[in-house]
Image (tube, helix red, strand yellow):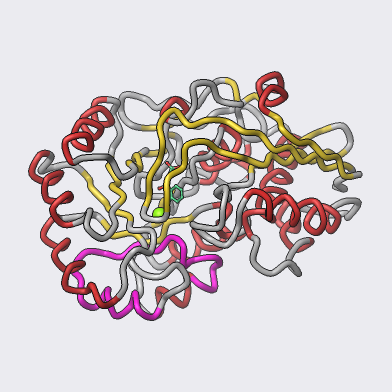
């Protein structure tokens, strides 16, 4: 298979509600979509970076340049035998894995469409209905947070993840645990703490959390190992794990006991598979993280999360929690059991709403 043409589009779409984490507030998204073509068949990928360099070093504008000037040209016209080789074409680019993954995932969608099979099957997925959780951003008050949780539970979601940061942690989690003694509950700090706050973090042990996500620096493994020794609650790494090599190092040091896999952060489906397999062979649970994706990224996450190692509920939830109208059809829906049912259609399994994408597009570039 040879990629003959790559189209880059930036779409802008407002979130239905602002999303606040320890690193900032997002009110609307600027998302790069990648469309790859070979012999009249196309595939779609979504770049999952944030607008600015706050979750990691990537942002919409830098990703555009990496895609247009490096990853795109390195991919165009090259013959590959399998989508697993797509990432190799851009491997000389250091970092910028979300930009690289936008092409890599598009090539996987294309490959599945060429075979006429759903992407989850091409990936070797086996889970029919994936368990879903929600990630709830920082709210203006504990009362507002409790109302929001109530609402998400009523929709069937199987676990609740709270964003925390210094000053919005122990008391807030205590209030949630008192109101909902039995729910599956996790917290995500997005790197807002240091080892100096080890005593505070230890107080979270009393709330029977499934995991504490990325408490310390975004590029750290060593300090997390020290923190894990002091905690009963499992640490889950997000930002720190960019590759299967990082997963190996983190698990060897016991820096975490659970890993959140994000397609973009690790460079695409092939590296995600390596991490999933490495963890599954060692009985380390993984789950699918989210980056406020529009429908294309969401559909890729669903396909990934059908692989057997994804045993914990992911941050994969219904389109309507984010968008008044998604860019795929149908929109992603969650069953009353808090699951998403995989689809049988070829590729990512959802149709592209080209009219909606055209309306939202603010820049478009064709590489060929
Ligand atoms: O750390 O998981 C994270 C959103 C943006 C950046 C980082 C994170 C998140 C989320 C939202 O938690 C997950 C989602 O619902 O897409
Ligand atoms: Mg996270």
Q: Nearer the viewer, residue 200 or 120?
A: 200
Position in image of residue 280 (x %, y %): 43, 61
Residue at the (55%, 38%) spot, across then down: 29
Ligand 2 in which quarter: bottom left
Find residue 266 and report its image quarter. Answer: bottom right
User: For this view, does 318 lie left or right of residue 178?
Assistant: right
Position in image of residue 88 (x %, y %): 75, 63
Position in image of residue 153 (x %, y %): 24, 31
Q: Nearer the viewer, residue 86 or 296?
A: 296
Quadrant containing the C terminus in the rendered view = top right
Whether the magenta-drawn stretch holds residue 230 is answered as yes
Q: Nearer the viewer, residue 121 or 190?
A: 190
Residue at the (33%, 58%) spot, across then down: 189
Q: Nearer the viewer, residue 227 or 28?
A: 28
Find residue 73 and report its image quarter. Answer: bottom right
Above or below residue 132? Residue 213 is below
Residue at the (69%, 39%) spot, across then down: 33
Number of residue marks: 0
Above or below residue 48? Residue 194 is below
Magenta region: which residues?
Answer: 222-246
Q: List the single residue furthest toward the left.
A: 178
Residue 234 appearing in the image? yes
User: For this view, does 193 lie left or right of residue 92?
Assistant: left
User: For this view, does 260 lie left or right of residue 192?
Assistant: right
Whether the magenta-drawn stretch holds residue 90 is answered as no
Find residue 66 and report its image quarter. Answer: bottom right
């Amino acid at each position: 298979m040879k990629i003959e043409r790559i189209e880059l589009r930036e779409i802008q779409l407002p979130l239905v509600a602002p999303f606040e984490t320890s690193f900032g507030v997002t009110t609307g998204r600027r998302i790069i979509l990648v469309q790859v073509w070979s012999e009249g068949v196309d595939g779609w990928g979504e770049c999952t970076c944030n607008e600015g360099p706050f979750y990691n070093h990537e942002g919409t504008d830098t990703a555009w340049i990496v895609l247009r000037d490096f990853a795109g040209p390195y991919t165009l016209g090259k013959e590959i035998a399998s989508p697993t080789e797509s990432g190799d074409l851009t491997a000389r680019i250091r970092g910028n894995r979300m930009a690289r993954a936008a092409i890599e995932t598009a090539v996987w969608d294309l490959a599945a469409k060429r075979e006429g099979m759903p992407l989850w099957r091409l990936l070797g997925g086996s889970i029919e209905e994936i368990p879903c959780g929600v990630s709830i951003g920082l709210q203006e008050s504990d009362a507002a947070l409790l109302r929001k949780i109530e609402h998400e539970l009523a929709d069937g979601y199987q676990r609740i993840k709270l964003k925390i940061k210094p000053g919005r942690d122990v008391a807030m989690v205590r209030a949630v645990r008192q109101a909902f003694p039995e729910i599956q509950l996790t917290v995500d700090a997005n790197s807002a703490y240091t080892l100096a706050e080890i005593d505070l973090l230890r107080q979270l042990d009393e709330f029977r959390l499934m995991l504490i996500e990325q408490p310390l620096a975004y590029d750290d493994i060593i300090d997390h190992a020290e923190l894990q020794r002091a905690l009963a609650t499992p640490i889950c790494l997000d930002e720190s794990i960019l590759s299967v090599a990082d997963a190996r190092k983190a698990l060897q040091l016991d820096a975490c006991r659970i890993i959140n896999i994000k397609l973009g952060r690790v460079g695409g489906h092939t590296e995600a598979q390596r991490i999933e397999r490495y963890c599954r062979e060692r009985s380390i649970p993984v789950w699918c993280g989210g980056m406020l994706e529009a429908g294309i990224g969401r559909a890729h996450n669903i396909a990934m999360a059908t692989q057997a190692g994804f045993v914990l509920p992911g941050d994969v939830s219904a389109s309507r929690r984010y968008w008044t109208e998604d860019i795929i059809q149908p929109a992603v829906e969650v069953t009353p059991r808090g699951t998403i049912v995989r689809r049988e259609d070829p590729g990512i399994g959802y149709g592209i709403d080209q009219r909606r994408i055209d309306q939202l597009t603010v820049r478009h570039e064709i590489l060929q």
